[in-house]
Amino acid sequence: MSILGRSARRANPPEGVPLDYIEPATLGVAVELLASDEAARPLGGGTALMLLMRYGFLRPSRLVGLRRLASDLGGISVNDRHELRLGALTTLRDLELSRQVARSAPVLVEALHIVGNVRVRNAATLGGHLAHGDPHQDLPPILLAMGARAHAVGPRGSRWIPLDQLNLGYYQTALEPAELLTELALPVQPEGTQGSYTKFTAVSAEDWPALGVAVFFRRDQDRLAGVRLALSAAMDRPQRLAGVEAMLDGERPSESLFQAAAETASSAVEPMADGGGSTAYKREMIRVHVRRALEKTMRAPALRSG
C-alpha cells in the first residue's frame, strides 16, 4: 500500500511550485511523508519557506502541505493545566485578534501589530514562526520570557520542549528530522505582572528586528519581583539573561539600577554582526534598549486575574 493510503492526497501545487506537493489528512501521515524523504519539507503558511526556495537556499523534493490539519493543529484554548494553548497552525493574525490572547498575554498582541504586515500575518503560522529558527523574529523572546513550552510530534513519538531549549543557533532548532510542532503552551502569568516588548529596527517598524527586548516583572510593594528579561535578534538565538534578572529581582526600581542592568546586559551576550549592524553597534543598542524596556515596563498596566 502506498504511504499516501486514504489519508493523504496529491493536490494541485501552489502557483510557481514545480515539485511534489502532498496534503495529508492526519498528523501521523504527515510525519511519515516527511520521514520517508530527507529532502521533504512541511508547508504551513509558507512565508519563510517560499523565500528560501525563491532565492535558492532550499530545494526540497517534496512539500507536505499542512492545511488539512488546521482543525487539529490550529485554534486557541485553555488546556487542563489552565495554560493558554496556541495551535501551531494558528495564524499570527488570529493570535493578534484573539480576545483570549489579549487577556492572558497582552504583550504578545502588542508585538503582533508590528510583525511584518497584515498580508504576512494572515498567512504566517505560529509553528512556522518558531520552527524556522531565524533569530530575527519578534515572538520568541516574549514567549521565552513567559516560560512557554512547545509540543512536537515525530517518528519517535511526542514530547514537550521548553522554549529555552528550542533554538540552538542560527537557523538551528532542537526539532529532529520529520518532527513537527503541534502547539505552544503559555503558563498563567501571576496577577500583577507587568510586561513589555521593545523592538529596534534599522528600517521600518514592521521590519525584522535588529534587537528585541522582552521584560516581565511584578512589584511587591516598592521592589521588583519575578523579573524575566529576554533578548533576541542581536545574537544567534533568543536568550534569557539570568544575571540581569538576578540583579534586578528584589531591588527598588531606579534610573541607576536600570542603567546598571543595561550595562550588564550589553556585556552578557555575544552579538553577531550582520545587516542590522556591527557587534559594537549592537552592544550599544542593547545598552540603550534594555534600559528603555525596563522603563516601559514600569508604565505598563498590571495583569489582573479573570
Image (tube, rainbow, N blue to C red):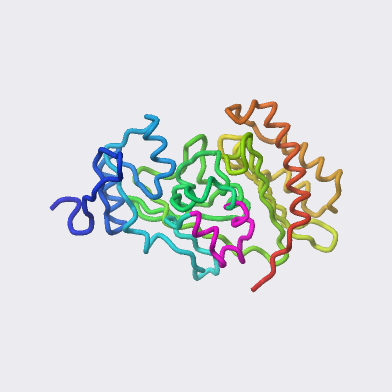
Left or right: residue 167 versus residue 16 is right
Q: Residue furthest bottom?
A: 306
In the image, 288 versus 208, the foreground residue is 208
Residue in the picture at 57% in, 40% down: 207
Quadrant of the frame with the C terminus:
bottom right
Main secondary structure along the magenta-highlighted residues: helix
In the image, 174 versus 135, the foreground residue is 135
In the image, 250 versus 201, the foreground residue is 201
Q: Which residues are magenta?
A: 92-112
Number of numbered discs overlaid on the protein picture: 0
Q: Is residue 36 above or below residue 84?
A: above
Asked which quadrant contains residue 71, the reply is: bottom left
- Residue 9 in percent (x, y) is at 21, 53
Left or right: residue 117 versus residue 254 is left
The verdict on residue 108 being magenta is yes
- Residue 173 in percent (x, y) is at 47, 41
The verdict on residue 242 being magenta is no
- Residue 208 in percent (x, y) is at 57, 39
